[in-house]
Image (spheres, helix red, strand yellow):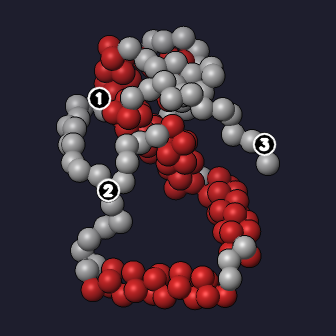
Amino acid sequence: MAPLPATIERATPVYRAIMLEVERRRQTLGLSMDGLSDEVGVADRYYAKALHPDTPSGRQARWETVQEILDAVFPGGFDIEIKPKIGGCLSAQDLRRKIRFAAADTNAVTRRKLMSELGRKGAAARSALSPEQRREIALKAAATKRAKRARPDEGLY
């Protein structure tokens, strides 16, 4: 498997969060990245660079351009909700991971590749643990599962 490109923390977490939601919407609409660039009226492949601003070839879009992208994927308008998040701000690595998971939701081949990769990583990590450590992890997972069953109305987020 090819290594991930180097990341440079250029973009702000709020920019990454907005672009993540735009990407999820683009995938839901079945619109290609080049198609979105054409619809917005920006240079070819500009959307991909704006989506990944923390890579060497990436660019953070101007806020006016972000607004045009939002108007293209949400033509009827949109609302933004800001709420507390468990954990830290959205980093460049988190953005890449979340985009991969979003793509896996819409494409069976991508989902298989992602699950295969995660399975290999998990197996390698488990093999480095002692039996006692694996037992503790299993007990914690079972307790979490029971807690989620007790509160089915609460989601994962």
Considering the numbered disc 1 on the image, is that residue within a helix, a strand or a loop? loop
Residue at disc 3, secondary structure: loop
Q: Position of residue 137 (x, y in %)?
A: 53, 81
Q: Which residue is mark 3?
A: 2
Which residue type does callout 3 highlight?
Answer: Ala
Q: Give the mark nearest the N terminus, 2 or 1.
A: 1
Contact, CB < 8 Å: mark 2 with mark 3? no
* Residue 34, x across and y down, in percent: 57, 24
Q: Which residue type does callout 1 highlight?
A: Pro
The structure residue drawn at horizontal position 32% and vertical position 56%, both measured from the top left corner, is 86
Residue at the disc numbered 2: 86
The mark that comes first in sequence, 2 or 3, is 3
Q: CA distance from mark 2 to mark 3?
A: 31 Å
Determine the residue positioned at 61% across, 83% down.
134
Q: Is residue 95 left or right of residue 109?
A: left
Q: Say which amino acid is labelled 2.
A: Ile
Front one among 131 and 62: 131
Gap between marks 3 and 1, in whole Å?
37 Å
| Closer-to-camera residue (131/146) | 131
Does residue 112 appear in the picture of this structure? no
Q: Is residue 52 above or below residue 21?
A: above
Please, is residue 50 above or below residue 112 in the view?
A: above
Residue drawn at x 66%, y 32% is: 6
In this view, the mark in front (2 or 1)? 2
Q: How many C-alpha atoms fall within 10 Å of the one at disc 1: few (<14), some, or many (≥20)?
A: few
Q: Secondary structure at mark 2?
A: loop
Q: Can the viewer see residue 43 in this picture?
A: yes
| Disc assigned to residue 112 | none
Q: Quadrant of the C terminus?
A: bottom left
Q: Earlier in the sequence, mark 3 or mark 1?
A: 3
| Residue position for label 1 | 75
